[in-house]
Image: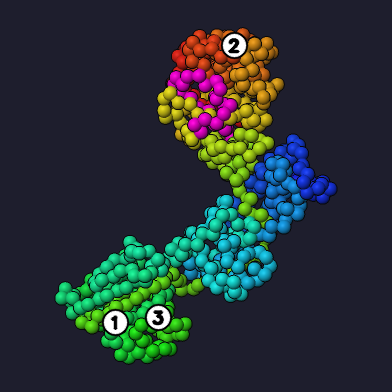
Amino acid sequence: MASKLSHFVLFSALLLFSRCLGENAKKSQTTQPSKHGEVYRAKSEIDSLIYKLTLDLNTFNDKKTLATAMQKDAEKLARVAKEEIALLKPVQHLLKKLAKGNDSSGYQSCMTERGGKIPVRIEATGSALPKHYTISVPVNHRQLIDRGLTRDNGDDLQVYYHDNGQHPVQIDRVIVGLGTKSATVQFSLQAPISANTVDDSSYSLVLGAAVSGSAMDNPDKVYAFHDDFSSSTLKKGWVKNWGQWSVQNGRLLGSTMQSKDLVKGNIEVGLYLKSGFQWKDVEVELDLMETGKKVSAPGPFLRLSNVNPSKTTGWWFEYYPVHADLCTMRPQANNKDGGWKYKGKLPTAFKLNTWFHFKYRVLGDRFSQWANGKLVHNNVQVGKEWKISAGTLGLGCYPSSHNCKTLYDNIKVTLLVATPPKSTLGIFKPGLLSQSALLGEKKLPADSCKQIHDASLVNNQPRAKNGVYWIKTDLQGSSSVQTYCDMKNGGWTLVGKISGKVGNIYKTWLVSNFNTAALNTPKITKQKEFACIDAHSLAVEEASTVLLSSGERADGLGSKWVMWRLPGDREKHSFWNHAVGASAVKAAVTTPVMVYAWNGNKKICYHNKYGIMPHGSHGGSYPYASLNTAGNTATNDYCMAVGVLAKGSTAHGWLQASTGYDSPSSDSDWPNRSYSHQSPRLTVWLK
């Protein structure tokens, strides 16, 4: 049934969209479309349907891990949901513009902005991928530029992460080979991926007009470690072990002299990363230049597991200008020196005052090395006595009196696995994804909490959780505010809370946004305070029921409450509008309404189309349901009202004689024992 309904709404929406296009084609560029209720209803339906389809898509993706038969069904349904969402997005965008009355260019203005997304497919073949593993995706950036989908500088090529199918968030990425056919986009996994699985829904490239805001491109959040020494001081992750280390002109300078404090040994660790001792398989890239003497012998450590000068343990890559064409991986185990055991020939001689770019890869008991892009060591296996299972990165030197004065720059560490994943791009999907948001988020505020609740239903159970959402305060505009939603009990919207003597609030209470931050929780925590949203539109155009509740809970409706249906003849301009005056309210027809209570009791009370208590000495209290048609009050019953005038005050023809506070004064005062306490304590909800 749900599928048929969604298809019907989809067809209706597309029909409306087509009609809008036809009408817009006839209009001049300066003509503004008029606002019709049909537009708002259609937009509300589209927003709800997209939200529901998105949640359905999440469920289908979750079910892919079940049995094969169910997986096929889930994949099919997921494809259908994706197709429907893709079709609905342009409609949603146009309706939003129509609702604001600023669509002056019709269909062309919606579709000429080129943009969209490309899903990233990550296939973990044989090895599990840990969190923070760096994914490298091949991208023909030149082709995307030529197609007009992204700019040369790559600022509008962003990576988004969908946490279990939720609304995507941008994550940091690095583009290597910008503007070329063989570029790569690199980003860090936000969650681990199990071995022999495929993830094709968690990550996507978002391009062109679809992007939102500036690109996030911090390499510190893309790699296991990164330092280009752009700061004037060392990062906190570095630990000095020997010698003098400082940042000079955007580069790291290590100056190491022989020290009497050092145990005699062939190599010592001068600087190391504190955070990397758990690293097993890694790839390290760095730039190195020796500026000391010809007999200086610098180089980095990998698999460094012990930095104690008397117990140095790690794999040291040594460069020695005396033997400029050669280098070695010189293993150390508990200060035992392996010597020039694993020699290699450099493609160019290691000379002083010359920059070299080195890359190292350690995987299991094997290592590889590249110098200036040329292979030096190819997957060399170390002997049993030199095996080290894990270790950090360090920088060292032969501790002779000749000293090392070594410059380092652009140090980067990425995690490795035995079997690298296959990362590829899917099919480009056009769309204005910067407009996309889940219902109830800031970019797409809902008409009510119930709209979100109903759109999230599966088997009559809401997938939306209790919490804070963005709700419109003007259904035909863009004004919205954050407030609490109780989804568990059907989608109640918190519109007000009050506690203690707060004075004259009739100009603000439930008709203006006031102290709305307090509505992030329904729990009442302060005395002599009130908070509310402008609930005019919600009460008249969306809700049908009002509920007064105790305020002891932070996770939804209180344990005690009363509720009743709102009057059927209420109007937006006059409902809960104190300024209409006592005369108009007294003259209004009063009708009976059934009030239901938390304990199963119910009582017939009375209300009018203004939602304001008519009795002249009760101060025009609201919301209200009174004992009789005159607006009298009584204690210990379920007819209640919230006082909005302080005792002795007058306004709009009413006097507050202190008898208009027909509401609980505490969370335990249900039903209320007094109607003259002047200190209401309750929360107000609409649904």
- Above or below: residue 637 compared with residue 331: above
Q: Residue 624 at what x, y percent from top left?
A: 58, 18
Q: Quick one: SS at disc 2?
A: loop
Q: How far apart are marks 2 and 1 (CA)?
A: 93 Å
Q: Tag 1 or tag 3, which sits nearer the N-term?
A: 1
Q: Residue 317 at what x, y percent from top left?
A: 34, 81
Q: Residue 353 at what x, y percent from top left?
A: 36, 82
Residues in magenta, as a range = 491-516
For residue 653, the mark is 2
Does residue 607 belong to the magenta stretch? no
Let me know if residue 102 appears in the view: yes
Let me know if residue 284 appears in the view: no
Label 2 with label 3: CB-CB less than 8 Å: no
Q: Residue 592 at what x, y percent from top left?
A: 65, 15
Which residue is under mark 3? Answer: 355
Task: Give the residue displayed 54% in from the left and 54% down from the top.
Answer: 169
Task: Give the residue displayed 27% in from the left and 68% down from the top.
Answer: 240
Task: Give the residue displayed 32% in from the left and 77% down from the top.
Answer: 406
Amino acid found under the numbered disc labelled 1: Gly
